[in-house]
Image: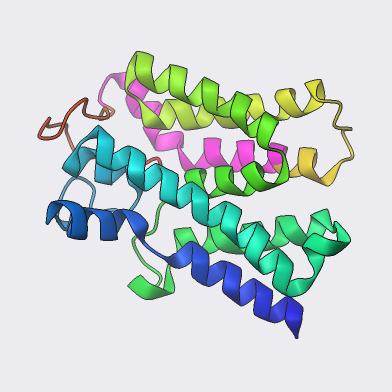
Amino acid sequence: MSTALAAVAAYLLGAIPFSLLIGKWGYGVDIREHGSGNVGATNLGRACGVRAGLFGLFFDAAKGAAAVFAAGTISGALARGDRLMLLGLGCCAVVGHMAPVFLAGKGGGKGVATGAGVFLAIDAPALGGAFLVFAATVLATRYVSLGSCLAAAALPAILLARDRQPADPVFLLSIAIAIAIAYKHRSNLARIRDGTESKLPLSRGAQTDPGPDAS
């Protein structure tokens, strides 16, 4: 029972549409009516500026970490050090972000930030290295999708450098996440190749062509 309750709690945490709430409460903007209409941090950045997007990114990541700690406490997995259970609870939060019940299961993000929050709770130093790759890429190119893909691709290598073994569930999950993120962003990568992918605005009010989100 505690495991089922923890899974539901993790999902509900992940389903909180923080970027939508930040847009509405902080800027008076319904981000579903702007850009791609998605409720992820990327579209928040497009609609309200980079600062708002960073706030959305922070809270989307925070709910992934909170799911691991809070739901892990409910299930007892945190006390037992049960990494498989903790990773499973983190995945529940990611699913909540992608298909939020509060929005009838529609309009969620791609799970990048929430997945990062899960890894923040599991292996913070490795996530820190991946974040540096993400930040450097986005600052250099303003392509959030490219930053997400490169950061996800770098994470398995960072884990190996930190002496994670190839059979470690955390390493295997990082491989799966890298593949999933690349697949989810295949259309974004094609538009980058063609020079038509939208970029993150550098300030509020900057306009970019709307396109599918990367968050």
Task: Look at the image and give the residue range highlighted in magenta.
Answer: 174-196
- Residue drawn at point x = 60 percent, y = 76 percent: 8
Seen in the image, is 50 located left or right of residue 73? left
Q: Quadrant of residue 105?
A: bottom left
The image shows residue 163 at horizontal and vertical percentages of 86, 26
Find residue 190 and report its horizontal and vertical position in percent: 39, 28
Residue 195 vs 110, above or below: the answer is above
For the point 83% across and 63% down, the residue is: 79
Give the prevailing secondary structure in the magenta stretch.
Answer: helix
Q: Is 178 rendered above or below residue 69?
A: above
* Residue 104 visible in the current orientation: no
Check the image and report above or below for 211 versus 88: above
Q: Residue at x 40, y 43 (%)?
A: 57
**Position of residue 198 measured from the top left corner of the image (x, y, whole percent):** 25, 30
Q: Is residue 154 left or right of residue 123?
A: left
> For the point 64% across and 65% down, which residue is it?
70
Q: Is residue 105 left or right of residue 157?
A: left
- In the rendered structure, the answer to whether residue 136 lies left or right of residue 201 reads right
70 or 40, nearer to the observer: 70
- In the picture, which quadrant includes the C terminus? top left
Q: Determine the residue located farthest toward the top in the rendered image.
A: 140
* x and y, in percent, of residue 12 in the image: 51, 71
What is the quadrant of the N terminus in the image?
bottom right
**Residue 184 falls within the magenta-colored stretch:** yes
Q: Within the magenta stretch, is there residue 158?
A: no
